[in-house]
Image (cartoon, rainbow, N blue to C red):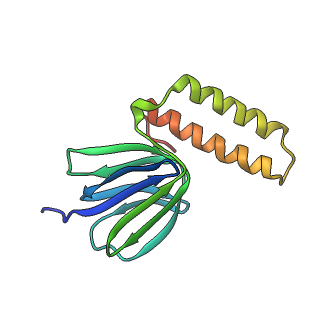
């Protein structure tokens, strides 16, 4: 059965990284994974770092390493607003491992309940997800 295409736009602070019609969006919110199809009920969700998959068709999938952000589903389509979105081939695993190490070091020295602890925790989660995506693994 053919799926109905709908418009998806992925925006970062640097601008639009994707603006096309797809048949499905797959991402992860704070409460779990989500697949979005055409004519889905309106939704607003907080996104976590993961692999964003945009299905042009069953065999044509555009993949991004997505940072934190939001997804909005409306009658007009889907809007994905994220801090960053990179194709897997843009990711440098060595650089990501350095960033992960810095986040882990920050976690060990940050005071309990501090903003620094929260930031380092978010960074650690992002870099772990991005490394998994760069290595072709599914982020946890």
Q: Residue furthest right?
A: 111
Give the side of residue 132 with respect to residue 104, left or right: left
x 70%, y 46%: residue: 121
Height in image: 108 above or below 15? above
x 44%, y 59%: residue: 80
Height in image: 82 above or below 4? above
x 34%, y 57%: residue: 25
Q: Residue furthest front?
A: 15
Residue 122 rendering spot, x and y as whole percentages = 66, 47
Give the side of residue 87 with respect to residue 109, left or right: left
Residue 37 rendering spot, x and y as whole percentages = 29, 65
Report the number of discs: 0
Q: Nearer the viewer, residue 140 or 8?
A: 8
Q: Residue furthest left?
A: 1
Height in image: 25 above or below 43? above
Give the side of residue 102 with respect to residue 36, left or right: right
Q: Residue furthest top?
A: 94
Residue 138 rendering spot, x and y as whole percentages = 44, 40
Q: Nearer the viewer, residue 99 or 133?
A: 99
Residue 36 rendering spot, x and y as whole percentages = 34, 64
Q: Quadrant of the N terminus?
A: bottom left
Q: Report which quarter residue 59 is drawn in.
A: top left
Residue 48 seen in this snapshot:
yes
x 44%, y 54%: residue: 11
Residue 136 seen in this snapshot:
no
């Amino acid at each position: 059965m053919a799926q109905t295409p709908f418009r998806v736009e992925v925006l970062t602070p640097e601008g639009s990284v994707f603006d096309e019609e797809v048949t499905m969006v797959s991402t992860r919110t704070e409460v779990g994974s989500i697949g979005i199809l055409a004519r889905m009920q309106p939704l607003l969700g907080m996104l976590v770092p993961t692999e964003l998959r945009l299905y042009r068709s069953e065999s044509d999938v555009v993949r991004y390493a997505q940072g934190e952000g939001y997804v909005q589903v409306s009658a007009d389509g889907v809007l994905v607003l994220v801090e960053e979105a990179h194709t897997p081939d843009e990711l440098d695993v060595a650089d990501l491992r350095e960033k992960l190490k810095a986040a882990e070091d920050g976690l060990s020295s940050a005071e309990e309940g501090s903003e620094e602890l929260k930031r380092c925790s978010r960074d650690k989660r992002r870099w772990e997800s991005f490394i998994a995506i760069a290595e072709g693994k599914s982020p946890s």
